[in-house]
Image (cartoon, grey):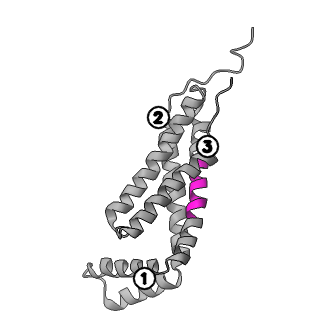
Amino acid sequence: MEKKITTHITSGLLISGVLIILAVVAYIASFDQQTWYKWLSGILFIGAVIYVCINYGKQQDNNVTFGNTFAYGFKTSAVVTCIMILFLIVFMQVFPEIKEKAMDEARKQMEKNPAVTESQIETSLGIMKKGFLVILILGSVFFYLGGGAIAAVIGAAVTKKNPRSPFDNQA
């Protein structure tokens, strides 16, 4: 009986599901703008991609190479990226006040810097307000694909590899 290999789509759906649940809980509990939460979700995502790379190697009886393990991890990250962008677009439509919360938090962060003037803050917030969704989507693409690529490299590097030659089974 042949082993069932988890596809990158299934892995991406599972990781996305966990990240979406975490995002909804964070929003409801009002800690979605906290720095520690952003670190937690990032570490969870990167750890999950590394885990699925290692698990992929195990499912293949370690008959993998760095390249195909990396490809599996990166494709998983691409699935997560697509789903999270769709989630963010829907979430922003359902909860439009997220934009205002983010603007308030950005203002607080800029006001902490004494070198930033009030006019610079207003200009920055005006640009951010006009392109909020685009900035959010581009930031998500950068975070999920960039972080996913790094995680896939790490996952592929730590996955035990014992690739067999196609000539091993010939007599």
Span colored in magenta: 74-85
Q: Mark 2 is on which residue type? A: Val
Q: Quadrant of residue 58?
A: top right
Q: Nearer the viewer, residue 144 or 26?
A: 26
Indicate which disc residue 158 carries.
2
Q: Mark 1 is on which residue type? A: Glu
Q: Is 81 displayed left or right of 117 in the figure? A: right
Indicate which disc residue 127 carries.
none
- The image position of residue 141, as x and y in percent, is 55, 63
Q: CA distance from mark 3 to mark 2?
A: 14 Å
Q: Is residue 95 above or below residue 156?
A: below
Whether tag 2 and tag 1 are in contact, CB under 8 A, the answer is no
Q: CA distance from mark 2 to mark 1?
A: 42 Å
Q: Quadrant of residue 86?
A: bottom right
Q: Nearer the viewer, residue 140 or 28?
A: 28
Indicate which disc residue 71 carries.
3
- The image position of residue 169, as x and y in percent, is 71, 14
Q: Mark 3 is on which residue type? A: Ala
Give the class, few, some or many, for how many residues have Cα within 10 Å of label 3's Cα (few <14, many ≥20): some
